[in-house]
Image (tube, rainbow, N blue to C red):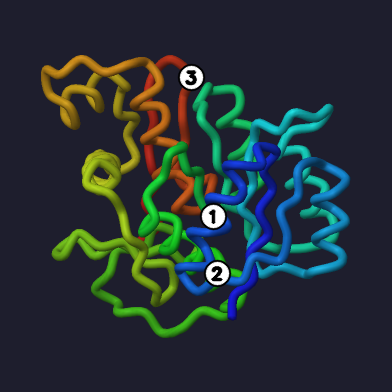
Amino acid sequence: MNKVLIVEDETIVALEIKKVLEKLDFTVTDMATGYDSALKSVKDNKPDIILMDIDLRDDKDGIDVAKQIQKTSNIPIIYTTAYSDEKTLNRAIETNPVTYLIKPFKRDELKSNILLGIYKSKNPTVPQIDKSLMRLGHDYYFDKENDKLYYKDMFIKLGLKERQLLRILIRANGSIVTFEDLEYKIWHNHTISASTLRTLIYRLRSKLHYDLIETVSNVGCRITINE
């Protein structure tokens, strides 16, 4: 059974996540509340994946914990947070997480990302891939006909807007797509908050290799296709 470590300083939230994970047939190894307890739990319990709250009430946040863990281990990490400011997103990206979940998140979304993270860590070799797929780089492939993203031979589930964003960037063929164009093409004339597009880009970026999508500050972003 797959083992999950929860790093969350809100006891009620941690217990609720634990309850959900156990219903999904995952084993929760521990519920750590900060930097020191998380590092100790990783050493003692050797989880398969870590569900890491970024916003810990500690001298060091979840990203600091992740960076320290990655010095000695390649355990995949899923970040959870109620916030999505650009500075935090950029720091999180540097640790190449499985994904970044904005609270409150859906149960199916949590399950699929945990399974993806564990699969990535346990399948380092590259299987044979259908040559008709578009190669994005770093073992990621996109099926343009069926609008599907794969890591090696594993299907990666994308949300509707994540698929829209990926299609737009792929069609731009390496050119920068401005944030204004992305807002219009995805939301049309609907008004969105400043963080909505930023969070969408991060969510897609975290499901790919972290450097496949390049963001140009205050301008836009692009994806370089490596066919």
Mark 3 lies on residue: 217
Which residue is found at the position 34% from the left and 40% from the top? 174
Residue 50, quarter of picture:
bottom right
Residue at mark 2 to residue at mark 1: CA–CA distance: 9 Å
Which residue is found at the position 68% from the left and 59% from the top? 5
Amino acid tagged 1: Val
Q: Quadrant of the N terminus?
A: bottom right
In the image, taking residue 20 as reference, residue 3 lies left or right, namely right
Residue 200 % position (x, y): 36, 35
In the rendered structure, are the residues bearing label 2 and label 1 in contact, judged by CB atoms less than 8 Å apart? yes
Using a 10 Å C-alpha cutoff, classify the residue at mark 1 as few (fewer than 14 neighbours), some (14 to 19) or many (20 or more): many
Disc 1 or 3, which lies upstream in sequence? 1
Mark 1 lies on residue: 98
Residue 188, quarter of picture:
top left
Disc 3 or 2, which lies upstream in sequence? 2
Residue 148 is labelled as none
Q: Nearer the viewer, mark 1 or mark 3?
A: 1
Residue at mark 1 to residue at mark 3: CA–CA distance: 23 Å
Could you tell me if residue 46 is visible in this image? yes
Residue 120 is labelled as 2
Residue 23 % position (x, y): 46, 68
Of the pair 64 and 103, the residue shown nearer to us = 103
Q: Quadrant of the C terminus?
A: bottom left
Of the pair 70 and 5, the residue shown nearer to us = 5
Residue 18, quarter of picture:
bottom right
In the image, taking residue 120 as reference, residue 29 lies left or right, namely right
